Amino acid sequence: MAMQFYASPEQVQRDRSEYARKGIARGRSAVVLTYEGGILLVAENITTLRKISEIYDKIGFAAVGRYNEFESLRRAGIRMADVNGYSYDRRDVTGRFLANAYTQTLGAIFTETQKPYEVEICIAQVGSSPETDELYRITYDGSVMDEPGFMAMGGQAEAISNVLRERHDASAELPLALALAAQALGSVGGENGQTRKLDQKQLEVAVLDRRRKGRAFRRIQGPALIQLLEGLKDVLDKDLGGVDAAPPPPPSVDKPTVSAAAEEDAASKPEAGKPAAGKPEAEPADPAEPADGVNGDGS
């Protein structure tokens, strides 16, 4: 009879942690930092798949690691936020609420399944001032940390965090904050330890704008991103981009309101006072006969 190998719970946890950390380190990095106008989310991304997205009105999502795993977490977070905001109040949906939910989910996956999720995510909520902004970092094992103003995930996150720690300024304007994020991401990954210069094709950028009412998430791309990377400060707000999903357009006046089947049924039915096609016209009723179909004596 074959005997199963025994592994202590501590060894199993260490193996799972090492597996998840190696998977996350192989990916490209992302940084999240506060600035004067809100929260900036920047990820090194050369694909059309999104690492940064909107969760709720004032809440953003950034992730690194395996795309299929953090995409399922993102969709679950959006559904949870929508259900709670609709059932109770939109103010009840907060970054801390979502961070706690992600912590429980990732913690259960790490301890109860054979393979942990190779993901690291950030939940960012913009406040009325830089002091009220919230950044929550949730790791693969369900651990959560409240980051003070900036954070880096994936790849060589420690080296990137050192650059952010030296130069981060919560009162900086958007071009300066974006330049710092791009420089921090480009400080690692070069040949022989050299720095890299990242352009708009290698970056995915979004902000949570504290000045906007309602949905604060705005995705920055195209010419606006190029101008900001060049240090221009006079980029118009309308050129910075909008949310991923715009509200539906008003219905068109030319859109039919009756189905084709209903129109065919209406055409096949005779009009009031006219006999149907192919049927003889009914004879007029005799005015001497009672209209109720009974005899004149009431029988």
Image (tube, grey):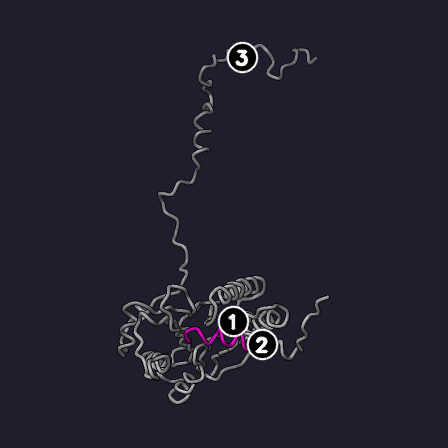
Q: Nearer the viewer, residue 67 or 223?
A: 67
Task: Give the crowd class for mark 3: few <14, some 14-19, many >=20 residues within 10 Å.
Answer: few
Which of 37 and 181 lies nearest the eye of the viewer? 181
Residue beneath disc 1: 118
Q: Of callouts 3 and 1, which one flags the residue occurring earlier in the amino acid sequence?
A: 1
Asked if residue 288 lies left or right of residue 261, the reply is right
**Foreground tag (2 vs 1):** 2
Quadrant in which residue 3 is drawn: bottom right
State which region is magenta: 16-29
All told, the count of numbered labels is 3
Q: Amino acid at mark 3?
A: Ala
What label does residue 110 carry, if any? none
User: Could you tell me which residue is drawn at 38 percent across and 85 percent down?
Assistant: 171
Residue at numbered disc 3: 285
The residue drawn where x is 55% and y is 10% is: 286
| Residue type indicated by callout 1 | Glu
- Measured as percent of width and height from the top left, residue 218 is found at 38, 69
* Residue, disc 2: 15
State the SS at label 2: helix
How crowded pointer 1 is (Cα within 10 Å; few <14, some 14-19, many 20+) is rated as many
Is 216 within the magenta? no
